[in-house]
Image (spheres, rainbow, N blue to C red):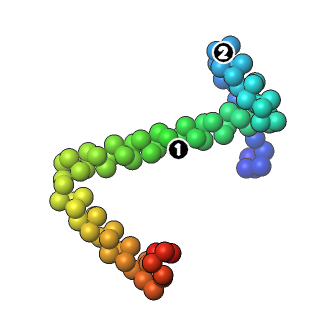
Amino acid sequence: MSSSVAQRHSVQISTRAHRWLQEAAEIEHASMGHVLERALERYRAEVITRLHNTMWAELAEEDPDAIAALRQEYECWDQVVSDGLPEDRA
């Protein structure tokens, strides 16, 4: 199926959630589907960030030397990336 053709799916949500979705759609002048999709995209990004932060915290706890080595490498890359730029632009 073409990526430009959206498939339709049904999901049961509470009356309260439906009301909020309807209100948000009215405020945004958008369809409820669009508002829901945007909300889910933000939620997905939040979950990924939380998992990423948890992973790094666990690594820092399990292997502090690995984290120290990564930080040192990041500092080297920061110097390379900003090489030649004025201080206020680095």
Front-most of 18 and 82?
A: 82
Relative to residue 36, is residue 69 drawn left or right?
left
C-alpha distance separating marks 2 and 1: 24 Å
Dot 1 crowding, Cα within 10 Å, few <14, some 14–19, many 20+: few
The image position of residue 70, as x and y in percent, is 28, 64
Secondary element at image label 1? helix
Residue in the image at 24% along x and 58% along y: 67
Please tell me which of labels 2 and 1 falls first in the chain: 2
Secondary element at image label 2? helix
Q: Is residue 9 visible?
A: yes
Q: Determine the residue located farthest toward the bottom in the rendered image.
A: 84
Residue in the image at 69% along x and 22% along y: 20
Q: Determine the residue located farthest toward the front in the rendered image.
A: 88
Q: Is residue 12 visible?
A: no
Label 1, on which residue?
Answer: 45
| Quarter of the figure with residue 22 | top right
- Which amino acid type corresponds to the residue marked 2 in the rendered image? Arg
Label 2, on which residue?
Answer: 16
Relative to residue 39, is residue 79 drawn left or right?
left
Residue in the image at 80% along x and 29% along y: 26
Residue 80 position (above or below residue 8): below
Mark 2 and mark 1 residues within 8 Å of each other at the beta carbon: no
The image position of residue 6, as x and y in percent, is 75, 41
Residue 70 position (above or below residue 49): below
- Which amino acid type corresponds to the residue marked 1 in the rendered image? Ala
The image position of residue 86, as x and y in percent, is 48, 81
Front-most of 80 and 66?
A: 80
